[in-house]
Amino acid sequence: MTDLVTISAGGLTARIAPLGAELCSLTDADGREWMTDADPAFWTGHAPLLFPIVGALAEGTLRNGEQAHALPRHGFARRSRFETVEQGPDHVRFRLTDSPETRAAYPFAFVLDMAFALDGPTLRMTATVRNPGLEPLPFSFGYHPAFAWPLPGATDRHAHTLTFACEEPGPIRRLRRDTGLMRDASFASPVEGRVLPLHENLFEDDAVIWTDLASRALTYGVKDGPALDLAFPDTPVLGLWQVPGAHYLCIEPWAGHADPDGFAGDIREKPGIVLLSGGESRSFRMDVTVRGG
């Protein structure tokens, strides 16, 4: 990726690719990388944006009335080139709008802005979806950042935890491996009060998903050591994922999720879908604050 856009401030440097408006690197004043190493043996992604869907659709098909459109898992934003519409030393904003290519898969007009700004030890990311049309716009949006595991300055990956802002006794959900659709069953929460100990075996059955998370913030890291404080005030769903053995942990705030197993309805009826009225917009924020420990 030779065309990365770089912003710096407060000792942090973020590098973002216009392809997908994807955060590819977040380094501190000592040059330490807080994002994934993107080892191709596991997964080469960094932080794709999930739009206009999160997860998989039944049979990979978006149903719009009598029409059917092929739309791959997580949508097309992550493979689309965004236009840079605003840039300064410590901030940048990208934009993706509908085109004949996007309308073939998703027959709706939209504007998706993705803004990055550095504020002291915090990277603030804000995605804004605008409906330029008259009819309600059905969509989902999600963040998919892969953070280093272990974090810089830590050696024991099993000393890492997630500490949620609230207790999370609610059940988790899982996906079907063959289709990527949400299983009907729910499973007991692995969270102990507010704390989730992290281990690769959490992901032997793929992602861990909360469809009704109580928290809108958490801390990922090591007690009295390096950590990231994450805030996601606008997204009620959370996914955790990694390929077991990889050097990253994906912490993914979502507005929406995969189709439930057996769902074959219109996109407007999809569980978790956002319906945005004509002329309106909706924003989804995610803040990442680096604490070096």
Image (tube, rainbow, N blue to C red):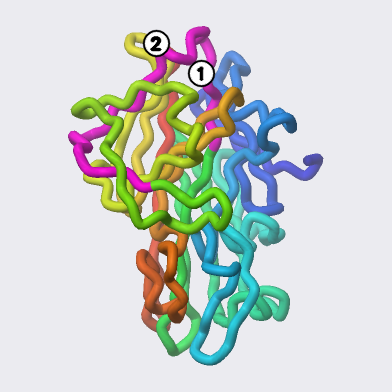
Q: What residue appears at the point 54 percent right and 49 percent down from the top-left corner?
A: 177
Range shown magenta: 146-173
Is 173 left, or right, of 131 in this rendering? left
Q: What residue appears at the point 53 percent right and 91 percent down from the top-left corner?
A: 66
Q: What residue appears at the point 54 percent right and 34 percent down from the top-left corner?
A: 242
Mark 2 burial class by Cα count in 10 Å: few <14, some 14-19, many 20+: some
Is 168 left, or right, of 220 in this rendering? left
Q: Which mark is residue 225?
A: 2
Asked if residue 118 shows in the view, the reply is no
Q: Is residue 150 in the magenta section? A: yes
Q: Regarding mark 1 in the picture, which secondary structure is present there?
A: loop
Point out residue 156 in the picture as x, y percentages from the top left corner. Answer: 48, 9
Q: Regarding mark 2 in the picture, which secondary structure is present there?
A: loop
Point out residue 100 in the picture as x, y percentages from the top left corner. Answer: 71, 80
Rendered view: 252 above or below 66: above
What amino acid type should be assigned to the residue bearing mark 2?
A: Gly
Is 29 left, or right, of 2 in this rendering? left
Which residue is identified by label 1? 151
Rendered view: 279 above or below 120: below
Give whichever of 53, 292 is nearer the camera.
53
Give whichever of 68, 145 is nearer the camera.
68
Point out residue 183 in the picture as x, y percentages from the top left corner. Answer: 40, 54
